[in-house]
Image (cartoon, rainbow, N blue to C red):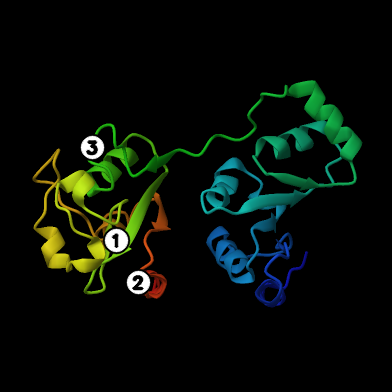
Amino acid sequence: VSDDAEALGTLRTNYKIARSVLDLSSSTLSPKEMVQATNKSGSKIVIVPKRMCVSETVDYFRTRYITVWANSDAENEAERLSLVLSGVQGIITPYTKEYRALMKKYFTETTLVRKPLFIGHRGIPSMAVENTLTSYKLASSKGAGMVELDIHLTRDGQLVIMHDDNLKGLTGVDKYISSMTLSEIKEIGFLSDPNERIPTLNEVLDEFAQKETVIVIEIKGASVGIEAKLTDGLKEKTT
């Protein structure tokens, strides 16, 4: 546990199995800056200031796959209950006995103290062609705060969205994405909707650039250079 993101980053680089916690409990950084610092440190857990222990802010971290802890010196039940209901996943406190009593008093084993994350897995495949712009936009309109997609690298180095590495299952075209150029892929429609097209990652990122929807990207296939292409592309979008 440390407030030094650089030191934790060095630790994680040299000892991959080490678990680290970034302590930002005294920080004045914004939530976005804290996410960036946590990622830089290689940590998956962050201790946030008391001012950030509200459900909306905690959810901001959770949707970015960061676990939230908080310090608590609360001496009254109302403050302790408020912290629990904020959705933080860990509480560091000398009042462990009191917190146990509070949990027993107000909650059962099946009580949810934080709302589930709603993720559109490949969009909404039951209502639109999976992994398409139409499917992602529909998922977002139905309340999904996150959408998940799969990427492959084309022969000419473009990132396109598709679950399988071969197009046959959804398009009827028995070709591998890695053997095709983007222009060739864009000529192909889907079996269930010939007018729908396979999107690029950039098209999805541009569509959601001004929205709160979180994009969850899964790398598929083993194309050489796909990680670097993704990293460079995301840096370009955020600078």
Residue 82 percent across, percent down from the top left: 71, 36
Residue 198 percent across, percent down from the top left: 20, 54
Tell me the tag on residue 201. 1
Mark 1, other Cα within 10 Å: few <14 / some 14–19 / many ≥20: many
Report the quarter where the N terminus lies.
Answer: bottom right
- Quarter-of-image position of residue 180: bottom left
- Look at mark 3 in the image and give the residue it sits on: 128
Tell me the tag on residue 131. none
Which residue is located at x 67 percent, y 35 percent? Answer: 85
Mark 3, other Cα within 10 Å: few <14 / some 14–19 / many ≥20: many
Q: Label 2 vs label 3: CA separation?
A: 27 Å
Mark 2, other Cα within 10 Å: few <14 / some 14–19 / many ≥20: some
Element type where label 3 sits in the image: loop
- Look at mark 2 in the image and give the residue it sits on: 233
Residue 60 percent across, percent down from the top left: 53, 50
- Quarter-of-image position of residue 137: top left
Q: Label 1 vs label 2: CA separation?
A: 9 Å
From what the image shows, is residue 1 above or below residue 4?
above
Q: Nearer the viewer, residue 161 or 239?
A: 161
What is the three-letter code of the residue carrying label 1? Leu
Element type where label 2 sits in the image: helix
